[in-house]
Image (cartoon, grey):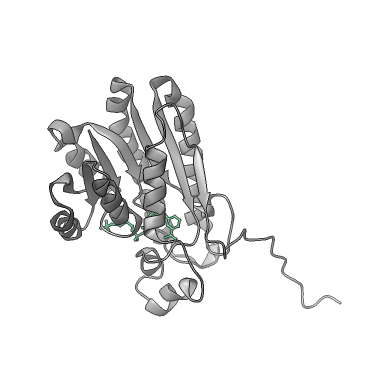
């Protein structure tokens, strides 16, 4: 039996590999940057299998998952973690290619991997899928436009998978984090602009990747009859967006 983590080369995914390997599980670490996965393999040893996979490319997903054999081919837990946000502009100012990339990764990519792995779980009548949603899937904020919408898809898809798969004894959970630092999320969002990337994490105690990885392990280790449907996590310092009102300065 193995655990498959998408987006394992950085951030939450990398930390999940460490936490699950240290807990004694076999982990298949997937991402586009094979060299990062190989470094992780050096660090964690034979319980980690590095496999290159681009979730936006259906053939890459098929080839990567078809290449698994023996014990590695039986996936008991799929963690759909690969994802990204691009930009923080008003919808009218965004680059359409950023919207496409977020939908390709966070929506289509997640569904390619899920669709490929589900049949083996259903055949065995056991398995667990943990998706990485976001508080952005529940609460709107300025500039979240397609990113938030893609995470709302993940939230609803998780619930609909539950509806379909309870009969097959398959568990489905959605982790919905708020502000989390020490990942590449913000560097990717702001396309390498370090100043902008650092700004959200200044003067605030954010969530750390190991917090999310430990939550994933806890969800997975619950008794087999229990399903954690969703779990929303924020730093204490963060709260709901609030309903912003723009005043008309020309009015009396
Ligand atoms: N950080 C936060 O504040 C936060 C909050 C809520 C939710 N989330 C969600 O949590 C997940 C992980 O975020 P993170 O903060 O850990 O981000 P991160 O540090 O940027 O890591 C993202 C991972 O996704 C992988 N990835 C991106 N595009 C991919 C693709 N096409 N195919 C395969 N892998 C791909 C990256 O690997 P390669 O580049 O090597 O492919 C990387 O390993 C995301 O779904 C994100 O939306 C993050």
Residue found farthest to the right: 252
Coordinates of residue 41 in the picture (x, y in percent): 15, 54
Residue located at (30% from left, 39% from top): 113
Asked if one can make out residue 107 in the rendered structure from this viewpoint, the answer is no
Residue located at (24% from left, 41% from top): 25
Residue located at (34% from left, 65% from top): 184
Coordinates of residue 172 in the picture (x, y in percent): 42, 34
- Residue nearer the viewer, 190 or 101: 190
- Residue nearer the viewer, 188 or 128: 128
Coordinates of residue 122 in the picture (x, y in percent): 33, 23
Q: In the displayed structure, does residue 223 sit left or right of residue 9?
A: right
**In the rendered image, which quarter contains the N terminus?**
top left
**In the rendered image, which quarter contains the C terminus?**
bottom right
Coordinates of residue 97 in the picture (x, y in percent): 39, 60
Q: Quadrant of ligand 1?
A: bottom left
Tally of numbered tags: 0
Figure check: 252 above or below 1: below
Figure check: 122 above or below 146: above
Q: In the displayed structure, does residue 92 sit left or right of residue 18?
A: right
Asked if one can make out residue 229 in the rendered structure from this viewpoint, the answer is yes
- Residue nearer the viewer, 57 or 180: 180
Residue located at (17% from left, 58% from top): 43
Figure check: 22 above or below 35: above
């Amino acid at each position: 039996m193995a655990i498959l983590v998408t987006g394992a080369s950085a951030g939450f995914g990398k930390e999940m590999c460490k936490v699950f390997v240290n807990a004694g599980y076999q982990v298949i670490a997937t991402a586009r940057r094979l060299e990062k996965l190989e470094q992780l393999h050096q660090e964690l040893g034979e319980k980690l299998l590095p496999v290159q996979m681009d979730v936006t490319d259906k053939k890459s997903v098929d080839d990567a998952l078809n290449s698994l054999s023996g014990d590695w081919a039986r996936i008991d837990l799929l963690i759909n973690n690969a994802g990204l946000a691009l930009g923080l502009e008003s919808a009218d100012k965004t680059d359409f290619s950023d919207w496409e990339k977020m939908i390709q990764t966070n929506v289509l990519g997640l569904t390619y991997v899920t669709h490929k792995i589900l049949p083996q779980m259903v055949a065995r009548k056991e398995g667990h899928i943990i998706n990485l949603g976001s508080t952005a899937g529940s609460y709107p904020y300025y500039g979240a436009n397609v990113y938030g919408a893609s995470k709302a898809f993940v939230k609803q898809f998780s619930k609909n998978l539950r509806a379909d798969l309870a009969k097959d004894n398959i568990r489905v959970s959605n982790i919905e984090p708020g502000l989390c630092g020490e990942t590449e999320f913000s560097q990717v969002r702001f396309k390498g602009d370090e100043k902008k990337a650092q700004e959200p994490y200044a003067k605030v105690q954010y969530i750390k990747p190991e917090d999310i990885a430990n939550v994933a392990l806890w969800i997975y280790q619950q008794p087999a009859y229990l399903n954690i449907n969703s779990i929303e996590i924020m730093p204490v310092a963060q709260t709901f967006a609030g309903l912003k009102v723009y005043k008309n300065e020309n009015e009396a």
